[in-house]
Amino acid sequence: MPAPQERDIEKTASLLKLWFVESQGLPDDISINIKGGPENTGFSNETLTFKVKHSNGKSEGYVIRFSPTGYKVFPDYDIKKQYQLMAFLKQQNITVPEVLAYEGDESILDSSFYLMRECSGEAPSDNPPFHQEGWVFDATPDVRSSLWTNWLDEMIKVHKIEADQSSIEFLNRPHLAANHLDQELAYYYKFHDWAMDGEDHPIADSAREFLKQNKPITDNNNSRIVWGDCRLANVMYTRNGELSAALDWEMAILGDPCLDLAWGIAIDDCNSLGLNIPKLPGFMSTEETIVYWEKHSGFSAANYDYFYTLALYKFTVIMIKVVKKLEYYEIMPTGLGAHINNHASGMLAKHMESK
């Protein structure tokens, strides 16, 4: 189900036109046609797709991503970081949309935002899950194999970037901890407490203790750019399985690249097995995916099991606020306890039984 539209579309179109004219140097005879936000994903960021039409009939597609002003899923947002990272990744030949401008003046559209070109292609659906219905469900096993392999290859391209530390320092979070893994753990432990607001979450509470007690030793010198929300539904493809854009970099961090591998597999598990939906033929198994990633990336998946547990824990924490957002907008009824008991926490509970 789509996230609720929180902006006055007509007013936003008028303000956007003014911004394009005054800040981007476009003529004042352009028109703005807003198509809306993403239909199958998008619970954390506000996103609008639109066309700019010129007097000569030429039309150009753009996407704006805002720092959210409504109900927030994450404790904080750094739209500028997303813009900086995507600009950097484009220089490294990563298949990200071309970012064109960052606007930090919140008075223009009530929040900061960045502008990027609209990309062709289609992302696999989260809602409903692509294992259940949609164009991926209707695709051949060979096409699905290409989707999975191309997703892995793009992930590996990101992990192989050897960047000067100063060029990606904006991904570092020394205010949370010195060690990059400790930074991620500290962020989600605080997120957990903020999301639950004093309420107990037995499954997540137990997983947090496990993560504290079993944390592997990691070295910042081995850290790479970690995509963060690295999963199949955050990639746009052609219908024959070719990758056209890698999306959604708001969760990007510095850390062990195996974090991305574990996250992508964990989310796929939650959106299939966690909903009692069989996985479609054509996709690699978990074991095959790990072997492929290690072989082609040159990195080790030695800490995969810990990172898989962490991924399920993080998704469980995020789902607390996703459900509360759905309740806030009356898309889901309150009182069901779904912020605690859902497909993410169910997968986490089942996984923790083996610990």
Image (spheres, rainbow, N blue to C red):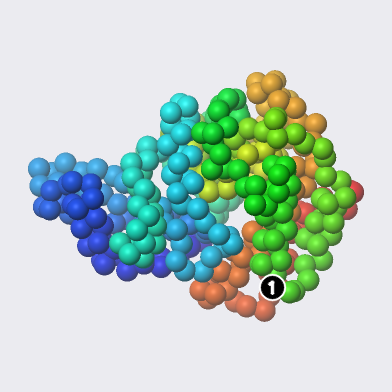
Q: Residue at x 51, y 69 (%)?
A: 71
Along the viewing direction, whichever of 129 and 54 lies nearer the viewer = 54
Q: Quadrant of residue 7?
A: bottom left
Q: Residue at x 51, y 33 (%)?
A: 167
17 sits to left or right of 150 = left
Residue 307: percent from left, percent from top:
75, 42
Along the viewing direction, whichever of 76 and 59 lies nearer the viewer = 76
Q: Amino acid at mark 1?
A: Asp
Compared with 20, 242 (above or below) is above
Q: Residue at x 85, y 56 (%)?
A: 209
- Considering the numbered disc 1 on the image, is that residue within a helix, a strand or a loop? loop
Along the viewing direction, whichever of 319 and 163 lies nearer the viewer = 163
Q: Quadrant of residue 230?
A: top right
Q: Which residue is mark 1?
A: 197
15 sits to left or right of 198 = left
Residue 201: percent from left, percent from top:
77, 67
Q: Is residue 42 visible?
A: no
Residue 341: percent from left, percent from top:
73, 66
322 sits to left or right of 304 = left
Residue 318: percent from left, percent from top:
64, 59
Q: How many marks?
A: 1
Compared with 29, 166 (above or below) is above
Q: Residue at x 30, y 52 (%)?
A: 50
Compared with 224, 322 (above or below) is below
Q: Residue furthest bottom?
A: 335
Q: Is residue 108 visible?
A: yes
Label 1 crowd (10 A; few <14 / some 14-19 / many >=20)? few
